[in-house]
Amino acid sequence: MAVRRIGGCVLLFLLPFLATADGGVSDKPACPDVGLAVLLSEKVLGQGGVQALEMEEPVTGPSGTEFRVRSFRSARRVAVQLEFSGGMPLSSRAVRASLIGPNHQTLKIVEVIEVALGSEDGTARIIVEAEAQPREARGVYTLELQDAEGTRLLVLPRVRFPSI
């Protein structure tokens, strides 16, 4: 039995009423399985809570724009975050991605999120999330971003993920 204290009083007497109330139990899980990409895009999750790895040097993109790359790992997911100062340098919106590893193995991409230029920090971000068990996503990967027509927007080699 769960007991919750509110204002120092234990409210056990409400449990029978809550259990019999219509609509008291939802078919939806109380905490849905939200991926890393959403947590990163909403800035709910930073470098704490999962293992993070930041490339030491900024990377130069196709238009000569420099950007930062961070990778993240949780128990079942990995994510790569590209952070662009001063706006998005890509010619169109990234909607597809692939992470290609050693021996041409690919990770299953869960989500690609493009976050517009933020007024508070002045950066735009692209976050790519993929499924990966702890034994997966070892070694060096290549990230490829594509637009809706399949045109390559960016190829980023030497992506690594932290260990757990």
Image (cartoon, rainbow, N blue to C red):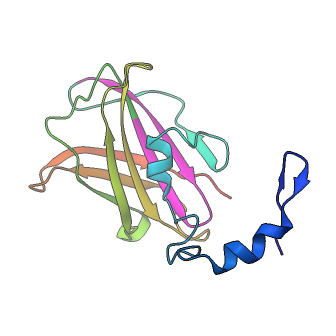
Indicate the position of residue 63 as horizontal and vertical percent values: 20, 26
Which of 150/14 is in front? 14
**Looking at the image, residue 131 lies above or below residue 161:** below
Indicate the position of residue 40 as horizontal and vertical percent values: 49, 44
Residue shown at 38%/28% (left/top)?
67
> Which quarter of the figure has residue 118?
top left
Q: How many marks?
A: 0
Please say whether residue 115 is one of the residues in the magenta stretch: no
Q: Quadrant of the C terminus?
A: bottom right
Residue shown at 49%/27% (left/top)?
57
Furthest residue in direction left, as rendered: 149
Q: Is residue 159 visible?
A: no
Q: Magenta span: helix, strand or loop, mainly?
A: strand
- The region drawn magenta spans 64-82
Indicate the position of residue 42 as horizontal and vertical percent values: 46, 41
Indicate the position of residue 141 as horizontal and vertical percent values: 42, 56
Residue shown at 22%/32% (left/top)?
62
42 relative position to 8: left or right: left
> Which quarter of the figure has residue 20?
bottom right
Which of 95/21 is in front? 21
Q: Is residue 157 visible?
A: yes
Residue shown at 58%/39% (left/top)?
46
Please say whether residue 72 is one of the residues in the magenta stretch: yes
Q: Quadrant of the N terminus?
A: bottom right
38 relative position to 87: left or right: right
